[in-house]
Amino acid sequence: MNTIFNFLVILLILLNFRLISSSRLTPCIHVLVLQAVILSGVAWMTHQGHMSVHLYFMLAVNIFLKAAVLPWMLTRVVEKNIISRELDPFVGYTASLIIGVVLLGISVMISRPLSLSHTLVEDFFLPVSLFTLFSGLFMIIARKKAITQVLGYMVMENGIYTFGVAMAIHEPFIVELSVLLDVFVAVLIMGVAIFHISREFNHIDTDRLSVLRDL
Amino acid sequence: MRFTIFFHVIAAFILSPMIPGIINKVKAFFAGRKGKPVLQMYYDLAKLVQKGAVYSHTTTWIFQTSPLVTAAVGIIGVMVVPLGNTPGLLAFPGDYILLVYLFGVSRFFTVLAALDTGSPFEGMGASREVQFSLLAEPALLLGLCALSALSGETSMNTMVTSLQAGTRPVLACAIFIVLLAENARIPFDDPTTHLELTMVHEVMILDHSGPDLALIEYGSALKLWAYASLTASLIVPNGIVNPWMSMGAGFVVLAGVTVTVGLIESIMARLRLIRVPQLLVGATILSLISLILIIR
């Protein structure tokens, strides 16, 4: 049981590294699907003893949204805009890997003094959730294309979800659902926005958006 | 027990030139050729030793010292590494750091000798070699540090035997990748290439001749043996008590590792030069992640 748990958590770390080191978009979306499935698996394993109907419902909605609907929407955006890779990010991919390790070190360091006394999961879990959060944030900062930034946003949300699994065992139902709804709406709007940006400007680099102004 | 240790070292001295022979035979088998004889390297070495060496006027004593250093490092290297459950002859706490930097010294002298010839091609090869080793060295050292932190031991012999069964094959894979990088094998460097432009390691020894070349070839065969034997030690089950049995298993696995090198060279092409640093950084990152997770 514990071995499988540790294996999944380490897989989560490696998937994050795959995300921040890959330039192609379709594999990144697949990684996100895998991450969502793993997270749901981890959540199920930690609450195995006392599963209730609303937890099952949560997991089902979570998997449905993050492993089916959102990836489908993102794939559509990728296909419609005929983009397959992010070519010149602000931070190169090898440098991103090195920064990723620094982020992992930082998340291990800041989670060491935070001792979780009453949680079901191991202390291993906290640094991983922080690291997922940080790597999502890093993707938002370091990439130019709007679509990769959306991916970063989703990774960040995964990190928050992991944190929720680790900390709040009986998180209020409504909070969890509203977070999911938030992500859903955000990705929907961003997907539409990306489509329009690319139709208007023939590319989806966001750095030119910063010089937009009223005429 | 002591006798098997000596036996391993003597076997390494005598048998190590056979390792490139086995690799070539496997490659020839996959290409549908008959291939060179397995003992080809012995003939080459015998021929080279009988010849005289030619030295260019631009070279200095560094050029003549470098082959000696390469061979000496190879000899010390096989004395340090364990094979199966047989400890190395010179095993002592912290010997893995010695192993990493011994080969570092040998590379340093090879690079100096290459620069000493004043040939632009050799300078280019030296530059690439230094660039790749800059990235491969942290991967190996951090990997061995993770190994040491995981097992709580500091000598390579006790380190590899005291690990749990589950983690050993994974680490064997990691050491095997470093073996390919450090010994200039195919995904990283092509030892049989004919064009100086694409060479990395081979271009640096172009100007050596006669006994010097023999020393370099012998030294690199010993280095390959040392890495293969370290990989084999992680694969041999640590439950074998009889020292001779364990040593025999070690030799079998070592031959298996050699065949695997040949297999990889047959089915893979060399990576583009620009991809090699990325792969090596990736290896370093993996070592770092495992180290962070272990000492957390």
Image: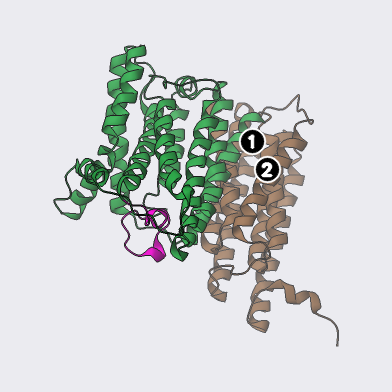
Chain colours: A brown, B green
Percent position (x, y) of residue B247?
Answer: 31, 20
Q: Is residue A5 shown to the viewer in this render? A: no
User: Residue lying farthest front?
Assistant: B57
Q: How many marks?
A: 2
**Residue A188 is drawn in which quadrant?**
bottom right
Position of residue B146 relative to residue B204, above or below, is above
* Residue A187 left/right relative to B80: right
Location of mark 1 (residue):
B292
Percent position (x, y) of residue B197?
Answer: 41, 66
Position of residue A32 relative to residue A13, above or below, is below
Residue ID at (48%, 48%): B62
| B203 within the magenta span | yes
Location of mark 2 (residue):
A104
Position of residue A215 relative to residue B42, above or below, is below
Percent position (x, y) of residue B41?
Answer: 24, 43
Q: Amino acid at mark 2?
A: Leu
Label drawn at residue A40: none
Query: What crowding class fits label 1: few (fewer than 14 Cα within 10 Å), some (14-19), or many (20 or more)?
Result: some
Asked whether the residues under the numbered discs 1 and 2 touch, taking CB atoms below 8 Å apart as contact, a structural biologist would say: yes
Position of residue B57 relative to residue A76, above or below, is above
Q: Amino acid at mark 1?
A: Ile
Q: Is residue A205 shown to the viewer in this render? A: yes
* Residue A103 left/right relative to B294: right
Secondary structure at numbered mark 1: helix
Separation of marks 1 and 2 at Cα, in angstroms: 8 Å
Residue ID at (86%, 84%): A214
**Residue B69 is drawn in which quadrant?**
top left
Q: In front: A7, or A196? A: A7
Q: In front: B113, or A67? A: B113
Question: In this picture, which residue range is highlighted in magenta?
Answer: B190-209
